[in-house]
Amino acid sequence: DIHKEIEELKSLIRDVPDFPKPGIVFKDITPLLHKPWAFQKVIDYIGNRYIGAGVEIVAGIESRGFILASALAYKIGAGLAIIRKPGKLPYKTVSASYTLEYGQDTIEIHEDAITKGTKVVLIDDVLATGGTMSAAIDLVEKLGGNIVSVDFLLELTFLGGRKRILEKGYPVFSLIKF
Ligand code: PRP
Ligand code: MG
């Protein structure tokens, strides 16, 4: 059944202590990606929710979000929009900044990546504080995209990111929760 399969997928997430800094336990998704059936299951679970939904664009966030976004776009027959770290995109961009523990970060999207009214699914690998995804939502909103859902492979529930996304008025889906 589905709960057992999700538990199996969850068991493929590796804890790496003291990465990237002492005291942080990093959730490493690479063992899951290494297993053909597991990666396929993840994309099928997320993608099957969009059968007949008319999603036009999947937007993924650099860099780990790209892994999921491109497979999902292929699976559901949508286009792919890439949200990148600053200075990487060649054409005209719009940008949004978000706060980190210390300082600020910025992400960008091409101004023509999404047109007004386009049905968009946003995806990233991890929902932690929700700062990255909030900024990504701001970008899609600036371009007038119609956000259908905000999806994650895994959610660190104790960091409260979900509330932040819900407050922006969009549904949140995560396959695996810690
Ligand atoms: C990680 C992760 C998410 C984000 C989640 O990305 O891939 O994008 O942090 O954190 P938040 O909810 O607190 O914003 P990171 O910025 O480490 O870059 P990467 O994807 O390039 O590894
Ligand atoms: Mg990331």
Image (cartoon, grey):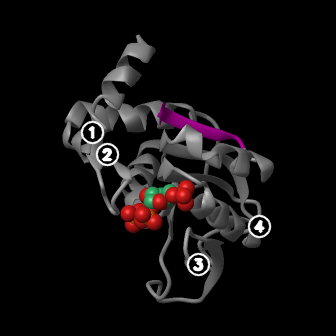
Q: How crowded is mark 1: few (under 14 residues within 10 Å), some or many (20 or more)?
A: many
Mark identifier at residue 144: 4
Q: How many marks?
A: 4
Residue 175, magenta (yes or no): yes
- Can you say whether 44 is above or below 151 in the image? above
Mark identifier at residue 29: 2
Image marks 4 and 2: residues in contact by CB distance under 8 Å = no
- Amino acid tagged 1: Leu
- Mark 3 or mark 4: whose residue is earlier in sequence: 3
Q: From mark 1 to mark 3, how far is it between C-alphas?
A: 30 Å
- Mark 1 or mark 3: whose residue is earlier in sequence: 1
Instruction: Point out the frontmost of discs 4 and 2.
Output: 2
* Residue that badge 3 annotates: 104
- Amino acid tagged 3: Gln
User: Is 48 in front, or is 87?
Assistant: 87
**Range of magenta residues:** 171-178
**SS state under label 4:** loop
